[in-house]
Image: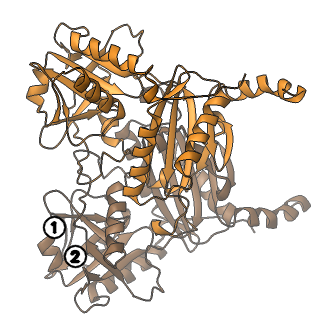
Chain colours: A brown, B orange
Amino acid sequence: MSELAQAEAPSARRRFKAGAAFVDGSYVPIDEARISILDTGFSRSDLTYDVVAVWDGAFFRLSDHLERFEEGCRRLRLTLPYERAEISSILIELVRLTGLRAAYVETICTRGVPEQGARDPRALENRFYAFAIPYVWLLRPDDAEGGMDAIIAHTVRRIPTTSVDPTVKNFHWGDLTRGLYEAYDRGARFPILLDHDGNVTEGAGYNVFAVVGERLLTPVSGTLEGITRQTILELAEREHIPAESTQLSEEEFRGASELFATSTAGGVMPIVSLDGEPVGSGSIGPMTGRLRDLYWQAHRDPRYLTPVDYPD
Amino acid sequence: MSELAQAEAPSARRRFKAGAAFVDGSYVPIDEARISILDTGFSRSDLTYDVVAVWDGAFFRLSDHLERFEEGCRRLRLTLPYERAEISSILIELVRLTGLRAAYVETICTRGVPEQGARDPRALENRFYAFAIPYVWLLRPDDAEGGMDAIIAHTVRRIPTTSVDPTVKNFHWGDLTRGLYEAYDRGARFPILLDHDGNVTEGAGYNVFAVVGERLLTPVSGTLEGITRQTILELAEREHIPAESTQLSEEEFRGASELFATSTAGGVMPIVSLDGEPVGSGSIGPMTGRLRDLYWQAHRDPRYLTPVDYPD
């Protein structure tokens, strides 16, 4: 390492410690990462995004996340300005800059910034943004409650798939935010939304699972096809646990012996109360515990990992 | 005027000619107006906004727009960091900076930027942004078609009010953007969306009206309560034109003798074709023309106006 690089390295690490972003082709500290107020990713929420975790110095299922991200772009007719290999390199560089061994890494593709007064989204040059920040826990492992206090929201329903496609990961969180406020008003923190037919969909950034009899069930529609959700379904199959993505009525969900949520931001998180009543024993159940262990063990499976080559 | 001010004035006008924005307490040229990539106004579309027009050097119905904006904030439990009089002053200053006599002026209040990893929207300091750019026409008066070529979208339905409240002006445009692409695919430019019961709601940034028999009808629900829409209803009442906001079925809408759209960005705009078929005569109808004239005449009514005191 040159003297200059030696001198700069610690200051660079300080600059990027809180996070690093890739904006308009440059790497900047997260606190300086800004997008144009005219970007239709903001003013029309016209975008898709993805979040991938870095755990113990390696990306987990990076190619699966990038495949979903690219598929979301295709469905919205967004053209990514970078190839997959370039995006991987950018994400790795972001994590290298921060030095974080556990990180929350987000990619975003927006429709872009219109010329003055222009309305036609087809004319826009689509934009790519990314950032890496310290790993985010929806439910911290040291949470005093030991699990999620959830509610089934009754003031709001999930945006239907006939309006916005939930499998294209999006920032249309108006319904989820209403659900969050309802949860707070009812003394809880984690809303779960029903669709307009009364079936369970998902929560504010997490998929949900229910153990009903011997079976593990998760909603099949009206929900993001989460990668963590997918990992759980794969692990269940490997372990010969009967699991199914299916329509899940509110009644079935309420009758479950165990409930848990899944998210890249926290993995497998037990739901220990629903509408103020304990779920099962009121603490993490055996199936949830087993799947949580398997989930974190999978983070040592080389097939799932893309290690980061950190600078010295 | 001091020599310095004389020297600076033309350069300031050049800097702000394309538009001016108020961001983080400062006035900046529109091209430099940026928001944090972590603002939940972006990452959760957690915000409300409003758009008011400046026409011939005066704001049109400024207090009505700001009242709706404040009401939207209340419903989302957002706290505006400025009082109404301060916001008015900011908007006037933005227009003064640009020198524009016809402008599109937007106010935005977002939930704000979370501390690292924080998820609770209640903890955030809400943010106010605003900008003024040259007046935007959804349909230019010199448009060769002379009116809107509209479709009724059949690939997408308007986000229901049970999910996102459309009377709180928002950037949840996923359904409207899908409608725009469907319109383009079908050789038109202006989608109109139905709700899940098959009633007409609104388009991508505009309310709609239908002349059915002797009556002027506009959807009562599932739609923004547009100020231009309100102005038309008030003008109709004053002129003794029977007008009503009501449920408007697709069938009634298709049978109308005249259709038009309303928006702050363009005023009253005739819809001259629907799904490729001419509406009425296929050009602007008598009721639409009359209301368009009355609408622009109202822009000279001092009760509606807040004049801008432009610098010399």
Which residue is the site of mark 2?
A210
Whole-number angstrom distance, CA of label 2 to CA of label 1 = 9 Å
**Image marks 2 and 1: residues in contact by CB distance under 8 Å:** yes
Q: Specify the amino acid type for callout 2.
A: Ala
* Quadrant placement of the C terminus of chain B: top right
Q: Specify the amino acid type for callout 1.
A: Leu
Q: Quadrant of residue B139?
A: top left
Question: Can see residue A193?
Answer: yes
> Is B37 on the left or on the right of A292, as rendered?
right
Rendered location of residue B204, percent (x, y): 33, 32
Rendered location of residue B170, percent (x, y): 39, 45
* Quadrant placement of the N terminus of chain B: top right
Whether A144 is drawn above or below A23: the answer is: below
Q: Which mark is on residue A248?
A: 1
Q: Chain of mark 1?
A: A
**A176 or B127: nearer the viewer:** B127
